[in-house]
């Protein structure tokens, strides 16, 4: 898809959002951020809350595409966190996409949508296997995917829902990945995350798609990467621990 207008990135100040903004800037796209905190290195960055419909609609005015990452990124209190950020926020951003005439929206979902399939150990999980959401956070992601399909069919908006792998945000996450082969296989490096969203921007002719996005698995393919490759042309480059920052490691790991 040829994109010359503004790409709105919500959650632009976050772990994955910053990587996405950096990759889009590298490819010379016009990027607008939207986050409740300041986005480093981005001039056109709106500070606002995704649960505030007016702020979202203003930020989306005139944009060509929306990459929706703003959310509470894991399980948290449903009424005070997930409901406003991950449910009302999805409603606001889809309505803003419809009213602004954006051509495409990319919705960040999660591998946690297929959580309990881990018990059956039938790998890889495919995108059209029945979801088994881990808990409220993942159930809210299923909601986003479902209504994303509804907007594609009802309003002709191009919608891509991506079940993202594990992009460690802090030292505790880093330790979690070190101690689990499964986590290493669903690792998503910041660089691959940026490249994935750039592919989602550039892919032509997508009506509605759900895809998984991880880096290259180290031991075993847990999440089927074929739809991302076939529909969006996404090929991950990194394998755990490639692309992870030294800052997340403790001293002994840095010395290795
Ligand atoms: N990092 C991962 O491993 C992972 C895995 C699967 C899915 N995801 C999804 O990817 C997206 C980004 O996750 P992340 O890891 O970058 O998380 P993050 O917490 O680093 O970034 C989220 C950003 O959204 C912003 N935000 C949160 N609530 C907001 C609100 N109400 N209004 C405006 N901005 C708000 C935060 O300020 C933050 O900058 C989320 O949708 C998350 O659910 C992340």
Image: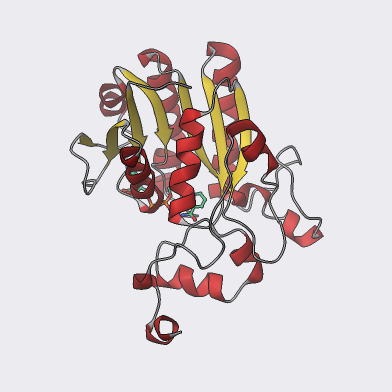
Q: How far across and how far down the image is residue 119, in percent?
A: 77, 61
How far from the left and from the top, in percent, is residue 228?
62, 39
Q: Quadrant of residue 109?
A: top right
Q: Is residue 91 above or below residue 10?
A: above
Left or right: residue 33 compared with residue 221: left
The answer to which of 78 and 230 lies nearer the viewer is 230
Give whichever of 253, 126 is nearer the camera. Answer: 253
- Which is nearer the eye, 122 or 130? 122
Residue 214 in the image: above or below residue 48: below
Q: Residue at x 55, y 66 (%)?
A: 240
Residue at horizontal 64 percent and vertical 60 percent from the top: 217
In depth, the one of 252 and 53 nearer the eye is 252
Whole-percent x and y of residue 154?
57, 12
**Residue at figure coordinates x 67%, y 54% from the top left:** 115
Is 93 placed left or right of 146 in the picture? left
In the rendered view, tell whether residue 157 sits above or below residue 211.
Answer: above
Q: Residue at x 41, y 21 (%)?
A: 97
């Amino acid at each position: 898809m040829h994109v010359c207008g503004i790409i709105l990135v919500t959650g632009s100040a976050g772990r994955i959002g910053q990587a996405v903004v950096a990759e889009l800037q590298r490819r010379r796209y016009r990027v607008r951020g939207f986050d409740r905190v300041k986005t480093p290195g981005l001039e056109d960055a709106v500070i606002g809350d995704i649960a505030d419909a007016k702020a979202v609609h203003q930020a989306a005015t005139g944009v060509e595409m929306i990459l929706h990452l703003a959310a509470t990124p894991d399980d948290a209190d449903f009424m005070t966190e997930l409901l406003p950020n991950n449910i009302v926020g999805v409603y606001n951003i889809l309505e803003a996409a419809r009213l602004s005439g954006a051509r495409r929206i990319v919705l960040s979902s999660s591998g946690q949508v297929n959580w309990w399939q881990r018990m059956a150990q039938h790998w890889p999980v495919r995108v059209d296997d029945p979801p088994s959401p881990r808990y409220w956070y993942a159930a809210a992601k299923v909601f986003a995917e479902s209504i994303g399909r509804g907007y594609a069919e009802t309003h002709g908006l191009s919608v891509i829902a991506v079940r993202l792998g594990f992009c460690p945000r802090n030292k505790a996450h880093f330790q979690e990945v070190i101690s689990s082969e499964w986590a290493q296989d669903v690792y998503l490096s910041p660089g691959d995350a940026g490249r994935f969203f750039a592919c989602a921007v550039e892919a032509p002719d997508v009506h509605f798609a759900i895809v998984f996005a991880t880096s290259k698995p180290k031991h075993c393919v847990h999440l089927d990467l074929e739809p991302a490759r076939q529909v969006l042309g996404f090929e991950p480059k990194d394998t755990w621990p490639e692309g992870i920052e030294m800052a997340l490691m403790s001293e002994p790991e840095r010395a290795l």
